[in-house]
């Protein structure tokens, strides 16, 4: 069988609701590697909150973080790191634009540095993976470098209004996504970036054609990736728009969906 590139979203896809990789799925992925297939992660998370899964699976491929805004190879200096941050001028405009919506907070990440507009212990706990450096204060004053991504934590009933305002005013310079429950968060990256953009150079680097890419996802930040891949696979727990464009719909992240699918698709003998 020809080599495939298996692309894995993390939350709601590879990871169970307990944020672990199930035994069956992990063993199937390890067998896929032994059979010569390549495996990579494509996530909205920063690398500091991803590296533990990269190491658990023993990966040796580049990784897509921040929904395509940061692509690097943790094990190779030969890979040319791709980092496309948001302009500080745009960040200041966004802060000005959303203040009237009574947002809960704004957050910016410069790779492993986290900036909070307003101090919030709950958010700091949620972003504590990898022990980032936290700075609290008005982003327009304290943020000195172009951020990799920006988050708007809003009241649920304001989320779509804010997103529409961002479309109307900043569509040419930023792209934005809505997080899944329970966080009512809008994530912003530089315009034109998404997971598919990050995957393309990795596939070229590995010399694997688009037709041999199998990508798994569950949320709206996976839409371009699922559409781009030769086989786009939606989890059983995925949002309806993702299921509507996927080539396959499988079991949920809590039902070994990935493991069971790959066992059959790649003819990997089950040993458990």
Image (spheres, helix red, strand yellow):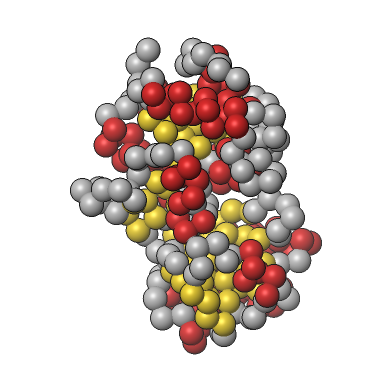
Q: What's the residue at 64%, 80% (across, down)?
A: 118
Could you tell me which residue is drawn at 56 percent across and 43 percent down?
A: 10
In the image, residue 100 sits, relative to residue 182, either above or below, namely: below
Left or right for 25, reference 70:
right
> Within the image, what quadrant is residue 239 found in?
top right
Of all residues, the one furthest to the front in this rendering is 272
**Nearest to the observer: residue 36 or residue 265:** 36
Residue 203 at x, y = what percent? 33, 34
175 vs 88: above or below:
above
Residue positioned most to the right:
157
Residue 186 screen position, x and y as percent = 62, 60
In depth, the one of 33 and 236 nearer the eye is 33
Instruction: Give the x, y percent position of residue 59.
Output: 39, 39
Count how many numbered circles sit on residues in the image.
Answer: 0
In front of the other: 130 or 138: 130
Q: Is residue 261 above or below residue 101?
A: above
| Residue 47, horizontal then vertical, whole percent | 45, 55
Q: Is residue 60 left or right of residue 174?
A: left
Q: Quadrant of the N terminus?
A: top left
x 60%, y 32%: residue: 23
Asked which quadrant contains residue 183, the reply is bottom right
Taking the view exactly as shown, the residue that stands out farthest to the left is 78
Q: Quadrant of the C terminus?
A: top right
> Residue placed at 48% from the left, 42% from the top?
56
Is residue 72 left or right of 269 when viewed as pictured? left
């Amino acid at each position: 069988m020809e080599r495939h590139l298996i692309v894995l979203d993390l939350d709601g896809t590879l990871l169970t609701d307990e944020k672990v990789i199930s035994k069956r799925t992990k063993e199937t992925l390890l067998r896929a590697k032994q059979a010569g297939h390549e495996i990579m992660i494509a996530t909205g998370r920063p690398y500091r909150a991803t590296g533990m899964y990269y190491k658990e699976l023993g990966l040796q491929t580049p990784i897509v973080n921040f929904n395509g805004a940061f692509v690097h190879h943790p094990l190779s200096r030969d890979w040319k790191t791709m980092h496309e941050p948001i302009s500080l001028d745009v960040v200041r405009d966004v802060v000005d634009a959303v203040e009237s919506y009574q947002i809960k907070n704004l957050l910016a990440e410069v790779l492993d540095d986290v900036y909070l507009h307003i101090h919030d212990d709950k958010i700091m706990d949620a972003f504590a993976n990898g022990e980032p450096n936290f700075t609290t204060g008005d982003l327009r004053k304290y943020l000195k470098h172009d951020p990799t991504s920006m988050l708007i934590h809003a009241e649920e009933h304001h989320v779509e209004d804010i997103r529409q305002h961002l479309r109307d005013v900043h569509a040419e310079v930023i792209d934005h996504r809505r997080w899944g429950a329970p966080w009512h968060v809008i994530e912003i990256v530089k315009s034109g970036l998404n997971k598919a953009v990050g995957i393309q150079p990795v596939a070229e680097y590995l010399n694997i054609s688009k037709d041999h890419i199998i990508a798994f996802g569950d949320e709206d930040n996976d839409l371009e990736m699922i559409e781009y891949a030769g086989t786009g696979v939606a989890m059983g727990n995925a949002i309806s728009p993702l299921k509507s464009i996927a080539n396959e719909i499988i079991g949920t992240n809590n039902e070994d969906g990935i493991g069971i699918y790959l066992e059959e698709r790649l003819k990997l003998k089950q040993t458990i």
